[in-house]
Image: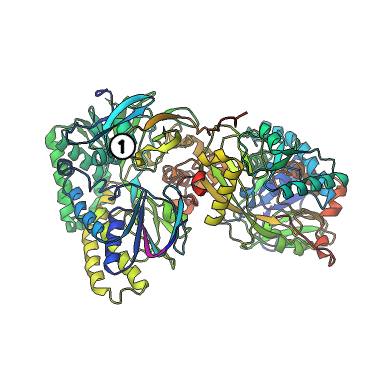
Amino acid sequence: METNKGENTRMSKRQMTVVGGGLLGAAIAYGAARAGTSVHILDQGDSALRASRGNFGLVWVHGKGATMPDYVQWTKEGLRLWPELQNELMELTGVDAGLQQPGGFWLGFDEKDVEARAVALDKINQDGGDVPFQMMDRAELRQYLPGLGDAVVGGSFCSLDGQANPLMLLRALHAALKAKGVDIISGVDIAKVEYDAGTGMFDAVAKDGRRWKSDRLVLAAGLGNAALAPQVGLLAPVKPTRGQVLITERLKPFLDYPTNKCRQTKEGTVQLGSTAEDVGYDDGTSADKIEWLARRAVETFPVLGQARLVRAWGALRPLTPDGYPIYQESQTCPGAFVVSSHSGVTLAASHCYVLGPWTSGLTQTPQEFKSFRGERFLDPNASFSNGY
Amino acid sequence: MATDTFFSIPKSTAARTVTITFEGEPLSVPAGISVAAALLAGGVKNFRSSVVGGRPRAPYCMMGVCFECLVEIDGIPARQSCLIPVREGMAIRRQIGAVELQFGAGEKA
Amino acid sequence: MSGDVTDLVVIGAGPAGLAAACEARALGLSVILLDEQTTIGGQIYRNIEAAPPDRREILGEDYAAGQKLAAEFRESGTDYRGGTSVWNVTTDGTVDYVGGHTATVTGRCVLMASGAMERPFPIKGWTLPGAMGAGAAQILLKGAGAMPSGPVVLAGCGPLLYLLAWQYLRAGAEIGAVVDTTDAAGYVRALPHALGALMGWRDLSKGLKLLAALKRSGVPVYSGASALAIEGEAAVEALTFKHRGKPVRLSASLVLLHQGVVPNTQLSLSTGLEHHWNSAQLCWQPVTDEWGRMGDSALYVAGDSRGIVGALASATQGRLAALSIAKQLGAAADIAQRATELKRQLAGRTHIRPFLDALYRPLTEHRVPSRDDVTVCRCEEVTAGQIRSYVELGCLGPNQTKTFGRCGMGPCQGRFCGLTVTELIAEGRGVDPEEVGHYRVRPPIKPVLLGDFVD
């Protein structure tokens, strides 16, 4: 509820403000609203960096969590919950989030990389991952991926993996939020969050002075979390890593399975990604990377040489130093949460069904979340690599 | 054919002609003109079927911005025929829906 | 991959580009000119070098005037690369293009001269075979000497429509009817600019001659027409409209639509540099200084792609841009005299413009379809009704339509739907097009075969 500067208002319990209306904020808000919480979302609007628009669209587990077993379990659970979200959103809004889970392939262009891959996947399972996978040589890969280029020497397959449509998912979530009566207030740039220990209430304060009161606060502002989290005693050192992606014209279906760098959407376009660049806050595209991605696409599937590149875009992944999420409730300001993840599509169902009720105060903190606290980055003995 | 075309090109004795084919049928057309112009003057009214709805489409702008004049030329699909000059022996076919990638022998399962 | 570096890269071989290249070369600059077509002249002087004398006669003296410019260009020593499709331009002067394979050139300055394109005419049935732009028909006439086989209906408004009708009369083509949507209010709107029209009296008298010839010819002319729609199943069968309050139906298999031309801004928009909405010309324009320079960048814009000014003014703008570029690069110390001469020429060639813009302002109903079933995005077959529903769901601008549907995501990359989408959203939200904004255009600005990137 919006109030004027300085005015205090008594509120009913479980009034939640979510800062950020992207894939994370929308999913959590929907999950919370579903659980009976009264929610409003404050979103920057069209001028924001909008990492959600840049998600590649994989719904993926294999290869992830090599250095964090808890993340493997968290992701597996997310994949398991996805069909429920797909159906629920479809029924409630009529929008198809595009989930397909036929299994997915990782492709390697170097024998050493393929060997290293096999070792890494094995280690994940030795650490308790229990992620089914199969290593394949080129000949076997070609049975599933016809026309695979000679440049690919081998790869791995996981039956749990798949893809969805990130833009349709976001649209479906927004439609679902509308159906649940959740207010999405656009054009709001939150500069400050304040906590009153006496009342247990939060104020989210915009740059233009508007304020919103609540007793639960969820910071899902992507790169914006870095500045906001400390204001409620949390740490979210997210930094941008740019990814550029190419999209072709619509093609008649030829690729039945998504691969880690190349997938064909339901509409027939092929997405080719992605780069990992340290360019600050520049979400533009560059000719050299476009050319690089194009060349790699043709090496992977030579027939793609016949396809036309129609669009290219760049987006900034909000990455933590180790690439794993931050899901944490503040101890100094109970009721305030920071949520950071760059896998907004893979984890959408978990964000909805688990984070929604959790941030509403309805469930216990899941035990995996011990690994997802911001303080892990303060460890002077640890070194971090985000895998990009 | 002359009465059932959108456009016609008056025959000129001085002009050089080339022979192209559309859907296998030969067409004698003036040299140097665009494929789109040649097809329009040759009685073609339906260049392609649209990608989403399968609707018949034909050129609209003739200058390369509308992407309606897409046809398959010498085996390469979805080419903007208003930007390509005719050449002797060119084989042109309608573009039916989205581009279908051509796999080599033995590639497709 | 060519990495040629040159003083000036010109993109576009229409009057602006050709004139700029000539002027720059005369000042001693090295110039590379890139153009997608395989002949020079752009659209207005299409095929000027190869058009036979009888065709030039039909097309009229304005077209024939392009020969002189073409000849000057051939003498200029420009490195001319035809059949090249530019897919990327950066603000510091790198230009990537495809001409069989990808290549790159760098200019210390780059002049974008992509010219104009026809304004889309989104009415019912406009996607059927047999509905084409009047400009397209004129290109067919210029490039191939092609004329309508049967009686053709010309519909819409603007000088090009009447010029085409006049050219068809001279060529002996049969015109079924001219359906003129210039409304009475247009004359009232144009009145304040009448002085400008009189100052551009040469242009005015030319236009009046066209209209007089049309009247004498006996071709049926329906003035003040509105509510245009096209009937047909698999192809155009008829044009329907309202005339003096009564519905009219004209059988036709070829309908040529036209309601003016708009700047082809795909290239300039892709730079990310500032554009603004011109509410008199109802289109986006790049923001430039008086010479055509965009901000502090290495990029200039000249000709119709900077704002519709016509062929002669486009050439003058091209020369002025070249002067400024030469000064900027230190190749010309004193450009003042030549600049004054050209600025005077430019003024004389643009006096008529505000008058024409006001008089031939396209009807709102033909720019912003009120019927829900009219196709707006031709590539992805998105209708006006669907776009209106996106606005109701909270869509604020054209880029967000991509989240709701695939509007603007097809091969034309938003060229043909952009203006309509902006105006539809503006109407739905009750705000100015300036506030709604335009598609974010990124490279590749034309589709490129992935195979062209591989050596």
User: Quick check: is C279 in the magenta stretch?
Assistant: no
Instruction: Tell me where residue A112 appears, x and y as whole percent.
Output: 74, 50
Q: Which chain's residue wears label 1?
A: C
Position of A318 with respect to B6 (left or right) is: right
Instruction: Tell me where residue A103 appears, x and y as whole percent.
Output: 72, 35
Instruction: Tell me where residue A108 appears, x and y as whole percent.
Output: 69, 45
State the residue in front, B70 or C7: C7
Q: Which residue is mark 1?
A: C257
User: Quick check: is C9 in the magenta stretch?
Assistant: yes
Position of A249 with respect to A137 (left or right) is: left
Which residue is pictured at 21% across the width and 63% down the height? C345
Query: Which residue sits furthest bottom?
Result: C333
Q: Which residues are magenta?
A: C5-10
Instruction: Tell me where residue A249 appears, x and y as whole percent.
Output: 51, 39
State the residue in front, A331 or C253: C253
Can residue C135 be seen at all in this image of the molecule? yes
SS at mark 1 in the image: strand
Magenta stretch, main secondary structure, is strand
Position of A290 with respect to C359 (left or right) is: right
